[in-house]
Image (spheres, rainbow, N blue to C red):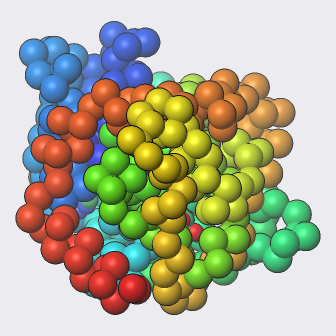
Amino acid sequence: MILVTGGAGFIGANFVLGWLAEHDEAVVNVDKLTYAGNLGTLDALRADPRHQFVKADIADAAILQNLLVKYRPRAVLHFAAESHVDRSLHGPADFVQTNLVGTFALLEAARAYWVRLKGAEQENFRFLHISTDEVYGSLAPDAPPFCETTPYAPNSPYAATKAGSDHLVRAYHHSYGLPVLTTHCSNNYGPYQFPEKLIPLIISHALAGKPLPVYGDGKQVRDWLYVADHCAALRAVLARGCSGQTYNIGGWNEKTNLEVVHTLCALLDRLRPKSSGSYRDQVTFVQDRPGHDRRYAINASKIERELGWRPAHTFETGLEETVRWYLDHSDWVHQIISGDYLKWLETQYAQRA
Ligand code: NAD
Ligand code: TYD
């Protein structure tokens, strides 16, 4: 079996659902269920004996160690993190705690487990750390995309704590020989993404008739990848990646935020037209994010060349699937929009008005 952390969040849950759709290998899913974790996403697995959910904090090394000894996974896939840049600007402490202290505790537990494995079990064990392109900082408009050797230059507390966790993972390989793999992926989108992130936020605000907040001039560039393609890349890295290596994952798909918002409006105009006018009329430019990275782009040549992975979705097909999914799953969105999230929206966007 495999052990996944953060498997009730956006990418982790997509990974677990995709994994069990393709494999019979069981999954232990360890998640603290913060505001971003949602067991409803895993409803389809409620009676599935291949899925064991454990509510726990990755910073609790003793619990993690017990789970590893009990379930004896052949791999740990580490998704759990505080993941939203804007929240990291408001409250960086949670990011230091989970992304740095939590990853450290998890590495300690994994090391204690791994050193006691024998022979092939020890040799084949893998710790797959899921990181982000944001650790590389911001690119100039004409700079080449990030590759695996691009120097780290994190700019937000989120990026800095992810960078720190990458360094710890690297050090556990070099110092102790723990067989690790690290991936750096660009911005994901798709089903089950918490509505604080750009794409689901725009969809839900559009449908609610609310302003569509675009930070600054909206010309910041992100390299978007459909979440199922990210999950397929992670399966390839786990199966064929070389211990100690890092792999950049991206969709060769750079878009300005304004292009993304306009495309979403056009899709909604077609799939759920308003009685009059276009969703574009709701676009509102708001105060920029402090220290906002201007451009991210990933050079995914290494994973394509060495592991034979390529994205299966274009931005057009992936985005239309995503919009259709949110239109068909308004109950999922309503279920996770709690009082706390409404408070966050109020604080976050009142300040930017
Ligand atoms: P998310 O915020 O949707 O989910 C994070 C999950 O981790 C939640 O289920 C939460 O409950 C859980 N969690 C948080 N703190 C925990 C703790 N201390 N112990 C146990 N569980 C805890 O995040 P996501 O978008 O699914 O991202 C998953 C991973 O992928 C993160 O490591 C993130 O840095 C990385 N990543 C995300 C993107 C993206 O575009 N979303 C891109 C590249 C990399
Ligand atoms: P986000 O989804 O928060 O991902 P990240 O900051 O990790 O890239 O934001 C994607 C881009 O969209 C980023 O440049 C910030 C911008 N953005 C807005 O313009 N308005 C918003 O309301 C949000 C949440 C993001």
Q: Is residue 103 visible?
A: no
Most foreground residue, 330 or 269? 269
Q: Quadrant of residue 275?
A: top left
| Residue 161 lies in quadrant | bottom left
| Above/below status of 210 relative to 345 | above
Tell me where residue 351 sits by quadrant: bottom left
Q: In this view, does 323 lie above or below 26?
A: below
The quadrant of the image that shows the C terminus is: bottom left
Residue at image location 53% in from the left, 84% down from the top: 288
Residue visible at 90% across and 70% down in the picture: 142
Residue 178, image x and y in percent? 49, 51
Where does the image place residue 196, in percent across and percent down from the top left?
A: 34, 61
Q: Which residue is drawn at 43% across and 55% down?
A: 202
Residue drawn at point x = 33 percent, y = 62 percent: 210
Q: In this orientation, which residue lies closer to the viewer: 314 or 58?
A: 314
Q: Quadrant of the N terminus?
A: top left
In this picture, residue 326 sits left or right of residue 304: left
> Could you tell me residue 286's position as x and y percent?
48, 81
From the top left corner, tell me how far across and down residue 155 is, in percent. 58, 83
Q: Nearer the viewer, residue 243 or 2?
A: 2
Seen from the viewer's position, the closer of residues 26 and 273 is: 273
